[in-house]
Amino acid sequence: MGGIGMTVVNSSLKPPAPARGVDVFVAAVPLTATKGAPQLLMSTAYSFSLSWDLQHFMVLTSSADLPSQVMVSDFQPQDPESIYAALAAISGRKIPGVLQMRMMKKLPKTKCWKVGSCKVDVVDTINKFNSNWDTDLIIGRHDCRHYTNGKKYVLDRLRTRQTSIA
């Protein structure tokens, strides 16, 4: 198992406990790539929804009591814009990954799906999940999609639903 690398971008990450539970979402954003043509290609593919796999997936949680506080959890390469990350993606080799937790002000307006709700301490639950997560990232075999899927195969169900709608 690789090292556990976790970046907490906001030290005051513990949002107040909600009275009515927490909604759980999955969101997709464009993959980051080296500047120039690779980055333009990734952004274009994302904009036109050309490939489900050319997106970065993350877990978001938000409370009905505090809709302006959205916590983001994800797994990505330590340096997603490096040429080494791109070469690893092409070759299937492992690279160092990082687990991140941070706050954002609101849910994305597009490519964001509610996948459930819970009444547990979300930060504690994510920390427990992260403590067992191998941070050796292998694109296509152990990456943001696998992190977001967790044990419930959320992305598999969403992908099936998106394909049937299109």
Image: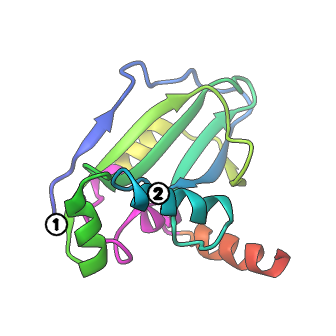
Task: Say above or below: 152 vs 26.
Answer: below
Which numbered disc covers residue 39? Answer: none
* Picture quadrant of residue 70: top right
Q: How is the image coloured?
A: rainbow
Quadrant of the rendering where the C terminus is positioned: bottom right
**At 56% across and 69% down in the image, what residue appears?**
152
Q: Closer to us: mark 2 or mark 1? A: 2
Left or right of 70 in this view: 96: left
Residue type, numbered disc 1? Met
Q: Position of residue 22 (x, y in %)?
A: 66, 38
In the rendered image, residue 129, in percent from the top left (x then y), is placed at 38, 53
Q: Residue shown at 64%/41% (left/top)?
A: 119
Q: Residue furthest right?
A: 165
- Which callout, 2 or 1, points at the residue further toward the start of the chain? 1
Disc 2 element:
loop
Q: How many marks?
A: 2
Mark 2 surroundings within 10 Å by alpha-carbon count, few (fewer than 14), some (14 through 19), many (20 or more): some
Magenta range is: 130-151
Q: Quadrant of residue 65?
A: top right
Horizontally, is 48 left or right of 90 in the view?
right
The residue drawn where x is 67% and y is 67% is: 49
Return the x and y of residue 61 as percentages of the image width and height: 60, 40
Q: Is residue 61 left or right of residue 149?
A: right
Residue identified by numbered label 1: 1
Task: Name the residue nearer the viewer: 141 or 32.
Answer: 32
- Residue 138 visible: no
Q: Quadrant of the N terminus?
A: bottom left
Q: Quick one: 33 or 126, which is closer to the camera? A: 33
The disc at residue 31 is 2
